[in-house]
Structures are given as structure tokens and as C-alpha cells.
Amino acid sequence: MSLVSRSPLPTRLKTARKAKGISQKNLGILAGIDEFSASARMNHYEKGKHFPDFDTLERIAKILDVPVPYFYCKDDQLAELLVQYGRMPSEKKKKLLTFLAELETL
């Protein structure tokens, strides 16, 4: 089995980018990639031919308003939970974690 077929990163990246309505080139440029190679590099990331280093992925995640772990999550429901959690203010995150801890004891 190839690395491409095992990694959810290419699919998650493309999904998040399209949801944000941004082109591969613009995303690459915003993430600090040279404008002349931005489109090709993002295309390679979305095809799974290459993978961004962690710093680049952090910048991409910030632009797309998703947490970095979202890109590595195979489970769709967990990926959506990560996105929702990442967008919550810290006070709501604390409440959610308290609720989950309480739910676990039931």
C-alpha cells in the first residue's frame, strides 16, 4: 500500500481549500510559497505526490481555518469535530471538555 493511499492529507487539504473558496495558487502564495511555483506545489500536495513540511502545513491550516490534526484524521466525523472544536472560543472548549468528562462517567 502506498503512502498516498494511506494518508488522508491530500483529500482533507483539497476539501478544506474548496470549502474556503480559494485557488491552489492563492493558497500557496498566502502560505508563503513563491508565486511561480505555488499552484504546482499545492497541486502536488493535493495529489499526494509531495507533502508539506509541518511549518507550511501550519500556515495552510491557519489560512483555511482548520486545525493541523484535521489533515491527518481518517475518520470524517472526528475530522469535523476537530474543525468545530478548533473554531470554538476557549471558554466553550472548556465547557465541552467538562461535558465529555461527565458523559464518560455515565
Image (cartoon, grey):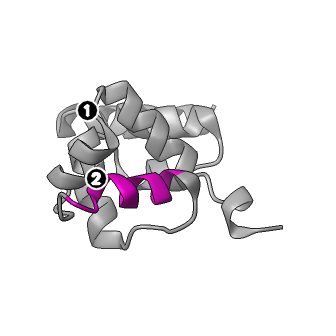
Q: Residue at point 33% right, 61% down?
A: 57
Front one among 76 and 52: 52
Front one among 105 and 94: 94
Q: Earlier in the sequence, mark 1 or mark 2?
A: 2
Eyeballing the image, is 69 above or below 20? below
58 to the left or right of 68: left
Foreground tag (1 vs 2): 2
> Which segment is the magenta one?
36-46
Q: Residue at point 21% right, 63% down?
A: 33
Specify the label residue 88 is tagged with.
1
Name which quarter of the figure residue 52 lies in. bottom left
Looking at the rendered structure, the secondary structure element under dot 2 is: helix
The residue lying furthest to the front in this view is 36
34 to the left or right of 53: left
52 to the left or right of 71: left
Residue 87 part of the magenta segment: no
Could you tell me how many numbered marks the image carries?
2
Instruction: Give x and y (percent) for residue 106.
Output: 63, 31
Instruction: Give x and y (percent) for residue 80.
Output: 49, 32
70 to the left or right of 66: right
Eyeballing the image, is 54 above or below 57? below
Q: Residues within 10 Å of mark 1 (few under 14, many from 20)?
A: few
Instruction: Give x and y (percent) for residue 46.
Output: 50, 51
Q: Which residue is mark 2?
A: 60
Residue 41 part of the magenta segment: yes
